[in-house]
Image (spheres, rainbow, N blue to C red):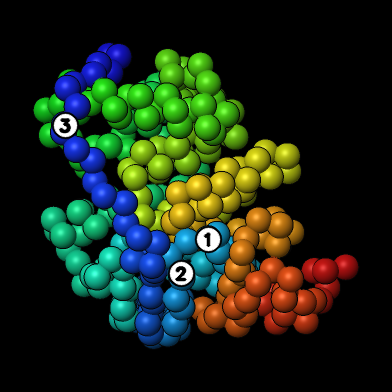
Amino acid sequence: MTPTAAPAAAGTASPVPSEDRALVIRGLTKEYRRGEPVLRGIDLTFPGSGLTAIIGPSGTGKSTLIRCVNRLVAPTSGQILFRGQDLAKLSGRALKAARRSIGMVFQEYNLVERLTVMENLLCGRLGYVPVWRAWLRRFPERDIARAFELMESVGLPGFARQRADTLSGGQRQRVGIARAIMQEPDIILADEPTSSLDPKTSVEIMDILQRVASERAIPVIVNIHNVELARRFASRIVGMTGGHVVHDGPPDGLTDADLKTIYGGESWME
Protein backbone atom coordinates (compact mmCIF):
# COMPACT_ATOMS: atom_id res chain seq x y z
CA MET A 1 0.00 0.00 0.00
CA THR A 2 1.34 3.41 -0.94
CA PRO A 3 1.48 5.91 1.95
CA THR A 4 -1.06 8.72 1.68
CA ALA A 5 -0.99 12.07 3.33
CA ALA A 6 -3.03 12.86 6.39
CA PRO A 7 -3.72 16.46 7.35
CA ALA A 8 -0.72 18.06 8.99
CA ALA A 9 -0.97 18.84 12.67
CA ALA A 10 -0.60 22.49 13.62
CA GLY A 11 2.78 23.64 14.90
CA THR A 12 6.17 21.96 15.15
CA ALA A 13 8.39 21.11 18.07
CA SER A 14 10.82 23.80 19.12
CA PRO A 15 14.47 22.97 18.37
CA VAL A 16 16.52 21.77 21.31
CA PRO A 17 19.61 23.89 22.11
CA SER A 18 22.76 21.86 21.40
CA GLU A 19 24.02 22.23 24.97
CA ASP A 20 20.91 20.33 26.12
CA ARG A 21 21.85 17.37 23.93
CA ALA A 22 25.01 16.49 25.84
CA LEU A 23 25.28 12.81 26.80
CA VAL A 24 26.95 12.02 30.13
CA ILE A 25 27.95 8.46 31.02
CA ARG A 26 29.07 7.76 34.59
CA GLY A 27 30.43 4.50 35.94
CA LEU A 28 28.77 2.42 33.22
CA THR A 29 29.24 -1.30 33.70
CA LYS A 30 27.79 -4.20 31.76
CA GLU A 31 28.07 -7.89 32.54
CA TYR A 32 26.47 -10.50 30.30
CA ARG A 33 27.86 -13.13 32.68
CA ARG A 34 28.26 -12.44 36.36
CA GLY A 35 31.82 -11.48 37.21
CA GLU A 36 32.80 -11.00 33.55
CA PRO A 37 32.29 -7.29 32.76
CA VAL A 38 32.31 -6.17 29.14
CA LEU A 39 32.21 -2.51 30.17
CA ARG A 40 34.24 -1.58 33.24
CA GLY A 41 33.13 1.70 34.78
CA ILE A 42 32.99 3.87 31.65
CA ASP A 43 33.03 7.64 32.24
CA LEU A 44 32.46 9.76 29.13
CA THR A 45 30.83 13.05 28.25
CA PHE A 46 29.73 13.70 24.68
CA PRO A 47 29.03 17.35 23.83
CA GLY A 48 25.78 18.43 22.22
CA SER A 49 27.13 18.37 18.66
CA GLY A 50 29.90 16.89 16.52
CA LEU A 51 30.90 13.42 15.33
CA THR A 52 32.73 11.16 17.79
CA ALA A 53 34.33 7.93 16.57
CA ILE A 54 34.83 5.03 18.98
CA ILE A 55 37.62 2.68 17.91
CA GLY A 56 39.08 -0.47 19.39
CA PRO A 57 39.49 -4.21 18.81
CA SER A 58 36.53 -6.56 18.42
CA GLY A 59 35.03 -7.63 21.72
CA THR A 60 36.18 -4.58 23.65
CA GLY A 61 32.67 -3.28 24.34
CA LYS A 62 32.15 -0.62 21.65
CA SER A 63 28.83 -1.99 20.44
CA THR A 64 27.71 -2.75 23.98
CA LEU A 65 28.36 0.87 24.92
CA ILE A 66 26.23 2.15 22.03
CA ARG A 67 23.46 -0.33 22.78
CA CYS A 68 23.40 0.60 26.45
CA VAL A 69 22.76 4.22 25.49
CA ASN A 70 19.62 3.39 23.50
CA ARG A 71 18.79 0.57 25.93
CA LEU A 72 18.85 -2.25 23.42
CA VAL A 73 21.10 -3.63 26.16
CA ALA A 74 20.31 -3.03 29.84
CA PRO A 75 23.34 -1.77 31.79
CA THR A 76 24.39 -3.61 34.92
CA SER A 77 25.17 -0.38 36.77
CA GLY A 78 25.98 3.28 36.18
CA GLN A 79 24.22 6.32 34.77
CA ILE A 80 23.38 7.43 31.22
CA LEU A 81 22.23 11.03 31.49
CA PHE A 82 20.49 12.59 28.49
CA ARG A 83 17.88 15.35 28.18
CA GLY A 84 17.40 15.50 31.95
CA GLN A 85 16.84 11.77 32.44
CA ASP A 86 18.88 8.75 33.46
CA LEU A 87 18.25 6.40 30.55
CA ALA A 88 19.62 3.50 32.58
CA LYS A 89 16.62 3.70 34.92
CA LEU A 90 13.85 4.04 32.36
CA SER A 91 11.36 1.35 31.40
CA GLY A 92 7.99 0.99 29.74
CA ARG A 93 6.42 4.12 28.26
CA ALA A 94 9.14 6.42 29.60
CA LEU A 95 11.82 4.41 27.79
CA LYS A 96 9.76 4.30 24.60
CA ALA A 97 9.34 8.07 24.72
CA ALA A 98 13.06 8.63 25.33
CA ARG A 99 14.01 6.40 22.39
CA ARG A 100 12.12 8.69 20.01
CA SER A 101 14.94 11.22 20.42
CA ILE A 102 17.70 8.63 19.82
CA GLY A 103 18.31 7.72 16.18
CA MET A 104 20.06 4.39 15.51
CA VAL A 105 22.00 3.31 12.41
CA PHE A 106 22.72 -0.43 12.36
CA GLN A 107 25.59 -2.44 10.91
CA GLU A 108 23.17 -4.75 9.09
CA TYR A 109 20.78 -1.91 8.15
CA ASN A 110 17.73 -3.33 10.02
CA LEU A 111 15.31 -2.37 7.24
CA VAL A 112 11.95 -4.00 6.56
CA GLU A 113 12.95 -5.79 3.38
CA ARG A 114 9.49 -6.11 1.81
CA LEU A 115 8.69 -2.42 2.26
CA THR A 116 9.62 0.40 -0.09
CA VAL A 117 12.22 3.04 0.66
CA MET A 118 9.45 5.54 1.42
CA GLU A 119 7.75 3.13 3.81
CA ASN A 120 11.02 2.37 5.58
CA LEU A 121 11.67 6.07 6.07
CA LEU A 122 8.20 6.61 7.46
CA CYS A 123 8.94 3.89 10.03
CA GLY A 124 11.01 6.62 11.66
CA ARG A 125 7.76 8.41 12.48
CA LEU A 126 5.95 5.47 14.09
CA GLY A 127 6.47 6.85 17.57
CA TYR A 128 4.71 10.09 16.59
CA VAL A 129 1.52 8.94 14.86
CA PRO A 130 -1.45 6.91 16.12
CA VAL A 131 -1.24 3.17 15.47
CA TRP A 132 -4.30 3.18 13.21
CA ARG A 133 -2.77 5.82 10.95
CA ALA A 134 0.48 3.88 10.67
CA TRP A 135 -1.48 0.70 9.88
CA LEU A 136 -3.35 2.50 7.08
CA ARG A 137 -0.17 4.31 5.90
CA ARG A 138 -1.87 7.62 6.68
CA PHE A 139 1.06 9.86 7.48
CA PRO A 140 1.00 13.69 7.68
CA GLU A 141 1.89 15.53 4.48
CA ARG A 142 4.92 17.09 6.15
CA ASP A 143 6.31 13.62 6.96
CA ILE A 144 5.99 12.48 3.36
CA ALA A 145 7.54 15.70 2.09
CA ARG A 146 10.38 15.33 4.59
CA ALA A 147 11.00 11.75 3.44
CA PHE A 148 11.39 12.93 -0.16
CA GLU A 149 13.83 15.63 1.01
CA LEU A 150 15.89 13.09 2.93
CA MET A 151 16.04 10.67 0.01
CA GLU A 152 17.51 13.51 -2.02
CA SER A 153 19.98 14.49 0.70
CA VAL A 154 21.38 10.95 1.12
CA GLY A 155 21.70 10.37 -2.61
CA LEU A 156 18.57 8.33 -3.33
CA PRO A 157 16.34 10.58 -5.46
CA GLY A 158 13.68 8.62 -7.30
CA PHE A 159 13.94 5.58 -4.98
CA ALA A 160 10.67 6.13 -3.08
CA ARG A 161 8.84 3.12 -4.55
CA GLN A 162 11.80 0.75 -4.70
CA ARG A 163 11.72 -2.18 -2.28
CA ALA A 164 14.49 -2.40 0.29
CA ASP A 165 15.41 -5.95 -0.74
CA THR A 166 16.43 -4.70 -4.20
CA LEU A 167 19.00 -2.20 -2.89
CA SER A 168 22.77 -2.49 -2.61
CA GLY A 169 24.46 -2.38 0.78
CA GLY A 170 25.40 1.25 0.41
CA GLN A 171 21.89 2.19 -0.66
CA ARG A 172 20.42 0.33 2.32
CA GLN A 173 22.68 2.18 4.72
CA ARG A 174 21.62 5.48 3.19
CA VAL A 175 18.01 4.49 3.86
CA GLY A 176 18.97 3.56 7.42
CA ILE A 177 20.50 6.99 8.01
CA ALA A 178 17.53 8.79 6.46
CA ARG A 179 15.14 6.74 8.62
CA ALA A 180 17.09 7.73 11.74
CA ILE A 181 16.87 11.41 10.75
CA MET A 182 13.12 11.03 10.20
CA GLN A 183 12.80 10.61 13.96
CA GLU A 184 14.06 14.19 14.35
CA PRO A 185 16.50 12.84 16.94
CA ASP A 186 18.60 14.76 19.42
CA ILE A 187 21.42 12.23 19.03
CA ILE A 188 22.35 9.56 16.46
CA LEU A 189 24.20 6.35 17.30
CA ALA A 190 25.82 4.35 14.49
CA ASP A 191 27.06 0.82 15.17
CA GLU A 192 29.73 -0.14 12.61
CA PRO A 193 27.86 1.56 9.73
CA THR A 194 30.65 0.89 7.17
CA SER A 195 31.81 -2.62 8.09
CA SER A 196 29.96 -4.32 5.20
CA LEU A 197 30.74 -1.67 2.60
CA ASP A 198 33.48 -1.10 0.03
CA PRO A 199 36.03 1.70 0.64
CA LYS A 200 34.38 4.27 -1.66
CA THR A 201 30.91 3.71 -0.23
CA SER A 202 32.32 3.78 3.32
CA VAL A 203 33.69 7.28 2.70
CA GLU A 204 30.33 8.40 1.32
CA ILE A 205 28.45 7.05 4.35
CA MET A 206 30.83 8.71 6.81
CA ASP A 207 30.52 11.96 4.87
CA ILE A 208 26.72 11.81 5.24
CA LEU A 209 27.01 11.18 8.99
CA GLN A 210 29.46 14.07 9.37
CA ARG A 211 27.05 16.36 7.50
CA VAL A 212 24.19 15.25 9.73
CA ALA A 213 26.20 16.14 12.83
CA SER A 214 27.10 19.54 11.39
CA GLU A 215 23.84 20.58 9.73
CA ARG A 216 21.54 19.36 12.51
CA ALA A 217 23.96 20.40 15.29
CA ILE A 218 23.50 17.12 17.15
CA PRO A 219 25.96 14.57 18.52
CA VAL A 220 26.67 11.59 16.25
CA ILE A 221 28.53 8.70 17.88
CA VAL A 222 30.00 6.09 15.52
CA ASN A 223 31.62 2.75 16.34
CA ILE A 224 34.12 2.06 13.60
CA HIS A 225 37.04 -0.28 12.91
CA ASN A 226 38.63 1.83 10.17
CA VAL A 227 41.06 4.15 11.94
CA GLU A 228 41.73 6.28 8.87
CA LEU A 229 38.02 6.95 8.39
CA ALA A 230 37.80 7.90 12.06
CA ARG A 231 40.70 10.33 11.65
CA ARG A 232 39.23 11.81 8.49
CA PHE A 233 35.65 12.42 9.62
CA ALA A 234 35.52 12.58 13.43
CA SER A 235 36.10 15.66 15.55
CA ARG A 236 36.95 13.40 18.48
CA ILE A 237 38.25 9.84 18.81
CA VAL A 238 37.64 7.60 21.81
CA GLY A 239 39.80 4.47 22.00
CA MET A 240 38.65 1.44 23.97
CA THR A 241 40.29 -1.81 24.93
CA GLY A 242 39.30 -4.47 27.43
CA GLY A 243 36.15 -2.60 28.39
CA HIS A 244 38.09 0.54 29.36
CA VAL A 245 38.55 3.93 27.70
CA VAL A 246 42.30 4.29 27.07
CA HIS A 247 42.32 7.27 24.70
CA ASP A 248 40.15 10.35 24.26
CA GLY A 249 41.11 13.30 22.11
CA PRO A 250 41.13 15.01 18.70
CA PRO A 251 42.08 13.02 15.57
CA ASP A 252 45.44 14.73 15.14
CA GLY A 253 46.36 13.69 18.67
CA LEU A 254 46.00 9.96 17.94
CA THR A 255 49.56 8.63 17.75
CA ASP A 256 51.03 5.25 16.82
CA ALA A 257 51.76 4.76 20.52
CA ASP A 258 48.06 5.31 21.27
CA LEU A 259 47.09 2.78 18.61
CA LYS A 260 49.46 0.22 20.09
CA THR A 261 47.81 0.72 23.46
CA ILE A 262 44.32 0.44 21.97
CA TYR A 263 44.93 -2.57 19.75
CA GLY A 264 47.73 -4.30 21.61
CA GLY A 265 51.24 -4.48 20.16
CA GLU A 266 52.32 -3.20 16.78
CA SER A 267 52.30 -6.22 14.43
CA TRP A 268 48.87 -5.22 13.09
CA MET A 269 50.34 -1.88 11.93
CA GLU A 270 52.97 -3.44 9.69
How many neighbours does mark 2 have within 10 angstroms: few (below 14), some (14-19), or many (20 or more)? some
Front position in the image: 81 or 240: 81
On screen, residue 98 versus residue 249, left or right, reads: left
Q: What residue lies at 36% left-to-right and 38% top-to-bottom? A: 182
Location of residue 242 (image quadrant)? bottom right
Where residue 136 appears, x then y in whole percent? 17, 20
How many neighbours does mark 3 have within 10 angstroms: few (below 14), some (14-19), or many (20 or more)? few
- The residue identified by callout 1 is 50
Where residue 110 appears, x then y in whole percent? 42, 40
120 versus 207 height, above or below: above
SS assignment at label 3: loop
Q: What residue lies at 55% left-to-right and 80% top-to-bottom? A: 245
Q: Earlier in the sequence, mark 2 or mark 3?
A: 3
On screen, residue 147 versus residue 227, left or right, reads: left
Q: Is residue 236 visible to the viewer in this orientation of the structure?
A: yes
Where residue 179 appears, x then y in whole percent? 40, 37
Q: Is residue 58 visible to the viewer in this orientation of the structure?
A: no
- The residue identified by callout 2 is 47
SS assignment at label 2: loop
Q: What amino acid is labelled 2 in the image?
A: Pro
Q: What is the spatial separation of the Cα atoms under label 2 and label 3, in whole angstroms?
A: 32 Å
225 versus 109 height, above or below: below
SS assignment at label 1: strand
Q: Which mark is residue 9?
A: 3
Q: What residue lies at 27% left-to-right and 14% top-to-bottom? A: 1
Where residue 156 appears, x then y in whole percent? 54, 25
